[in-house]
Amino acid sequence: MELTYTCQAMSPHPDHDLILALRGGNFSVLDDVYRNNAATITSWITKNSGSLADAQDVFQEGIIALHQKANDVNFVLTCPLGALLFRICQNKWLYHLRKKKREAEVRSLAPVQSEPEGNVHEMLEAVEEEDLRQRQMREAFVQLSELCQQLLRLLATGMPGADIAKKLEMTSASTVYRRRHACGERWRTLYESNKGVLS
């Protein structure tokens, strides 16, 4: 199947409406994304040393990466969503093959028939950088103490400091906010030290 995608220079692509819908919590657009892209991506992965299960896993990872990018309010889609999603999934599959040290298969993969034009590669790099940053943040978070993890999770829900203090058996809301600062600093330090490890 020939892939023919065109990208506009810097103006939003009509598919940007799908990004806005995702950002607004309208997940019904994912049905269209699946319907319009799953077959192409599945076909490419199964033709390049992958199973149907591999294709489904990679497609799901691609959807997650796309959704994370959609939540970035500064992100503007300037090419077809299918082109970006295909590149995300393609790179994730190539990474998977490299990770399994199947370099020979990676080098001999069938090239895509036609390259998307425009800034798809730049957008893909941005998505992948955000994906890496998120993984590094999660890795740093699980290295925090259990108390810090609980505290930061509760604060993220919007729970008042006094309620958190009671739940975590702290003396007051002031203690919660002092601990939040200390936990946040520790998280930042762990994140910075993990940057080179997961890249």
Image (cartoon, helix red, strand yellow):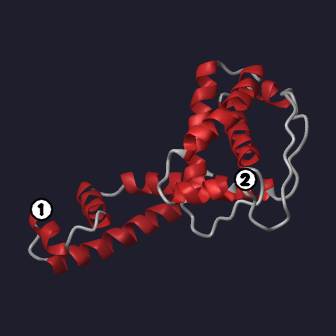
Q: Is 83 left, or right, of 64 in this rendering?
A: right
Query: Measuring 57% from the left and 68% from the top, which residue is drawn there?
Result: 73
* Residue at screen point 55% across, 56% down: 21
* 182 is higher (above) or lower (below) than 46: below
Q: Nearer the viewer, mark 1 or mark 2?
A: 2
At x 57% / y 30%, what residue is drawn? 57
Near mark 1 (Cα within 10 A), the count class, few <14, some 14-19 or many ≥20, is: few
1 relative to 199, above or below: above
Q: Calculate the distance from the C-alpha at mark 1 to the C-alpha at mark 2.
A: 42 Å
Judging depth in this view, the residue of 69 and 24 nearest the camera is 24
The kind of residue tagged 2 is Leu
Q: Quadrant of residue 119?
A: bottom right
Q: Residue flagged by tag 1: what amino acid is it?
A: Lys
Query: Where residue 38 sits in the image (x, y, percent)?
Result: 66, 31
Q: Is residue 40 left or right of residue 110?
A: left
Give the residue number, with chain letter if any, for mark 1: 167
Q: 151 left or right of 66?
A: left
The residue at 64%/58% (across/down) is 17
**Quadrant hosting residue 42:** top right
Task: State the residue in front, 158 or 164.
Answer: 158
Q: Is residue 153 above or below residue 73?
A: above
Q: Secondary structure at mark 1?
A: helix
> What residue did someone put label 2 on?
124
Residue 21 got which mark? none
Mark 2: give few (<14), some (14-19) or many (20+) Cα within 10 Å: many
* Residue 94, percent from left and from top: 73, 35
Please state the horizontal and vertical placement of residue 5, each as a whole percent of the image.
Answer: 84, 46
**Mark 1 or 2 closer to N-term?**
2
Q: Secondary structure at mark 2?
A: helix
Residue 85: give x, y in percent of width and height. Answer: 69, 44
Mark yes or no: residue 187 visible: yes
Q: Nearer the viewer, residue 29 or 135?
A: 29
